[in-house]
Amino acid sequence: MPTWERTLRPSPSSQSLLARAAAFCVAGRRTPLPEYDPLTDHNLHHYWRSPTTRAHLHEMGFIADDGSLISLDQYRRKLHVIEGDMHRAEQLRERRACREEQLQADQVGWRKIEVAKEKRAREIRDRKAEIRKWCLWLLEKRRDVDVKVLSKDLHKGVLCDWGTALRWAPLL
């Protein structure tokens, strides 16, 4: 591809112009353009001085209470910090709420366990009382049987001890 097509201009035709073009050097560096701030532009000073515009700028937070301008960069940084604080506060609130819900769920679970333990203890007490009643009833029944066996044996003239009576009691 010829040089002139890359640079959009024709190459120099004479040797002296070619040598001169080869020696051309730009020492400049790339720098960003300066930022334009309309609030500080002296040509718009009359616009920013109108009371309605100043009231609007004050509502938006670009002008302080004393009337001085607030830098947009500082304002954005301040807003970023405030938004970050609000975000962290919201996360903290959510964590606290989650922790409270977890504690309540744990308390409900522990209460259910306690109720189940109490119910089981009551069932065991009732069962023991039932077994005790049954054992007392059985002893009473055996005593009645022993008396009957002894009385029968005495009528027959056979002498019998309590051990024998107790062995025969379930059969009667």
Image (tube, rainbow, N blue to C red):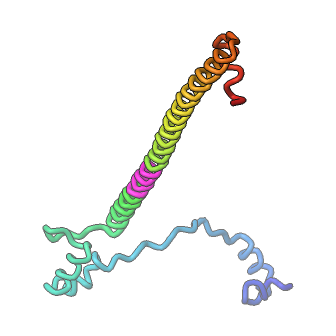
Residue 43, image x, y percentages: 26, 84
The secondary structure that most of the magenta stretch takes on is helix
x, y percentage for residue 41? 29, 79
170 and 79: which is toward the camera: 170
**Within the image, what quadrant is residue 49 found in?**
bottom left
- Which region is colored magenta? 93-105
- Residue at left offset 43%, top offset 47%: 107
**Rendered-image quadrant of the N terminus:** bottom right
Looking at the figure, which quarter contains the C terminus? top right
51 or 87, which is in the foreground?
87
Q: Position of residue 93 (x, y in %)?
A: 38, 56
For image coordinates 77% across by 78% down, the residue present is 18
Residue 36 occupies quadrant: bottom left
Position of 124 with respect to 152 (left or right) is: left
Apparent side of residue 111 relative to residue 38 in the rendered image (left or right): right
- Nearer to the camera, 168 or 51: 168
Q: Residue at x 72, y 29 (%)?
A: 171
Q: Is 50 drawn above or below residue 150 in the view shown?
A: below
Q: Is residue 54 magenta?
A: no
- Residue shown at 62%/69% (left/top)? 26
Q: Quadrant of residue 27?
A: bottom right
Residue 54 relative to residue 157: left or right? left
Front one among 3 and 21: 3
Q: How many marks can you see?
A: 0
Q: Outermost residue toward the right?
A: 1
Q: Is residue 161 above or below residue 45?
A: above
Tell me where residue 78 appears, x and y as whole percent. 33, 62
